[in-house]
């Protein structure tokens, strides 16, 4: 995806401190799966990794192919 297209689509990345704050919502609860429908580089799912049961599936949806590769490298399910 070109820089121009990313700009036109309004691609914005959530700061890590906000991702950590959002991930606190999941702490202490049991989930089969957590899905981030606009995963970007995966900062929310990364923040969740430290706070949830290791059995929880972390899934990411992203349309930017460059970011999909990053998400796969981080071990998130993108299927």
Image (tube, helix red, strand yellow):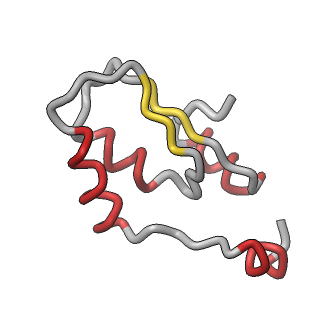
Which residue shows up at 29% across the image and 49% down it?
23
Which residue shows up at 35% across the image and 59% down it?
19
- In x, y percent, where is residue 73? 59, 42
Q: Image check: 5 left or right of 72?
A: right
Q: Is residue 5 above or below residue 68?
A: below
Q: Quadrant of the N terminus?
A: bottom right
Q: Quadrant of the C terminus?
A: top right
Q: Image check: 20 left or right of 45?
A: left
Number of marks in picture: 0
Which residue shows up at 83% across the image and 81% down it?
4
Q: Quadrant of residue 72?
A: top right
Q: Is residue 2 above or below residue 32?
A: below
Looking at the image, the residue that sits furthest to the left is 28
- In x, y percent, where is residue 30? 25, 22
- In x, y percent, where is residue 48? 32, 42
Which residue shows up at 39% across the image and 19% down it?
32
Q: Image check: 31 left or right of 14?
A: left
Q: Is residue 28 above or below residue 42?
A: above
């Amino acid at each position: 995806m070109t820089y121009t297209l990313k700009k036109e689509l309004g691609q914005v990345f959530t700061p890590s401190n906000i991702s950590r704050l959002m991930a606190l919502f999941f702490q202490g609860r049991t989930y089969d799966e957590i899905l981030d429908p606009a995963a970007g580089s995966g900062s929310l799912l990364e923040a969740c990794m430290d706070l949830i049961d290791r059995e929880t599936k972390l899934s990411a949806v992203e349309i930017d192919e460059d970011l999909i590769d990053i998400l796969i490298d981080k071990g998130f399910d993108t299927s």
